[in-house]
DNA sequence: ATGCTTATGTTATATTGTAACACGATATCA
DNA sequence: TGATATCGTGTTACAATATAACATAAGCAT
């Protein structure tokens, strides 16, 4: 999450293996807490999603799962795993891309705020904190009971801006 | 837009015919300005979208267009009209629903902020103003050049809260 | 072992969206 | 007036994403 801004999570040369390990450990722990099972399939799907900091489509996940296996897994199995992971908050769905990405911090209930680079597809989850004032006002003014927040901010990431000029 | 909050645009008993008329007039004017043509098909699609304050799917629009006609129109025609209207900012796409809704104010370039009722599907476009501070900070901290903002806040609208209890 | 619950396999199909090429209408201009 | 250029639509086929419905298997509780 983009709170400690000195070293953004998905910086091109961060230690990504650490991301994956952390995510899987968190997942295992969360499953223990909630008495849910992180089965082989679910873990494989989660690992594939964490393979990058870019949203991945369900069918891409299917293809990756198929690599080196005799049998292709069918869509429902992937979608079930995705549903499970979404339910637990271990991943998010990026609606504008029909794709899925790992959640930076499944431990607290929180919403889905992302910066998405239209050039390299990088998606960075950001701290929704700064937006809660405005959300609160909106809720008060509109009479809506807001239960889910989803924000997708698209543009160019720093790295792409630097390498591509403008 | 939810700035003048005394009389929310989509209140159950507002004068909806006025909404439709206003939308179509704005559309005609905008097309004149931008030297674009609001053809019969495009106008019909826009009118159908403005038929309610609820997001409508492309295939629903197709079905509506087919009513009372001999020939069904094919998907590409509808999607072309939708693309045209999106391009001009006359409608928005609600990504979480794969559906389209009229834009309250196509005259200024602006982003896509919506309150969506999960019970009755009502979608109210809201003023993004209150969020721009946080967006600006984010942009500065992240190095992203944010070009498009899309926010979908889901929950229960006042009317549903009142009629359904909780 | 027997049954219960949960996870996965399997088949078919629904829903949303596009590619590619053909046709037609309208505008422009020699 | 007719050539031609541009834009919008028609038509067919298909891609991409997601789900329904039912069958099987795997784990676990008595």
Image (spheres, coloured by chain):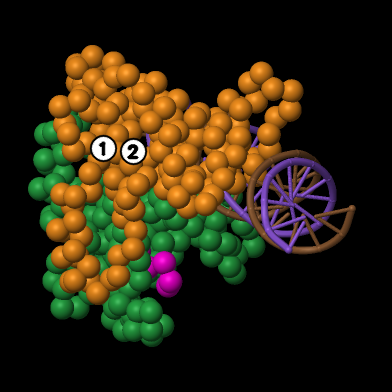
Chain colours: A orange, B green, C brown, D purple
Numbered label attached to residue A1: 1
Q: Is A128 left or right of B78, judged from the image as shown?
A: left
Magenta stretch: helix, strand or loop mostly? loop
B100, A160: nearer the viewer: A160
Query: Can residue B37 be seen?
Result: no
Q: Is residue A162 magenta?
A: no
The residue positioned 27% from the left and 28% from the top of the image is: A9
- Residue A121 position, x and y percent, is 36, 28
**From which residue to which does the magenta span run?**
B116-120
Q: Are marks 1 and 2 in contact (CB under 8 Å)?
A: yes
Mark before the other along the chain sequence, 1 or 2? 1
Q: Which quarter of the picture shows residue B11?
A: bottom left
Residue toward you, A3 or A57: A3
Name the disc covering residue B125, or none: none
- According to the picture, the residue beneath numbered tag 2 turns out to be A104
Q: Secondary structure at mark 1?
A: loop
CA neighbours of label 1 inside 10 A, class few (<14), some (14 to 19), many (20+): some
On the question of residue A50 being in view, the answer is yes
């Amino acid at each position: 999450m983009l709170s400690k801004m000195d070293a953004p999570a998905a910086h091109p040369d961060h230690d990504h293996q650490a991301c994956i390990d952390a995510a899987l450990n968190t997942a295992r722990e969360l499953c223990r807490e909630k008495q849910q099972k992180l089965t082989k399939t679910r873990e494989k799907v989660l690992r594939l999603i964490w393979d990058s900091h870019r949203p991945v489509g369900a069918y891409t996940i299917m293809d990756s799962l198929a690599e080196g296996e005799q049998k292709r897994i069918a869509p429902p199995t992937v979608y079930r795993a995705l549903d499970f992971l979404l339910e637990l908050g271990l991943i998010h769905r990026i609606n504008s891309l029909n794709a899925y990405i790992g959640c930076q911090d499944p431990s607290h209930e929180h919403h889905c705020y992302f910066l998405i680079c239209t050039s390299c597809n990088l998606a960075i989850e950001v701290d929704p904190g700064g937006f809660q004032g405005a959300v609160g006002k909106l809720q008060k003014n509109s009479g809506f009971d807001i239960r889910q927040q989803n924000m997708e901010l698209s543009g160019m990431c720093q790295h792409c801006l630097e390498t591509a000029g403008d």
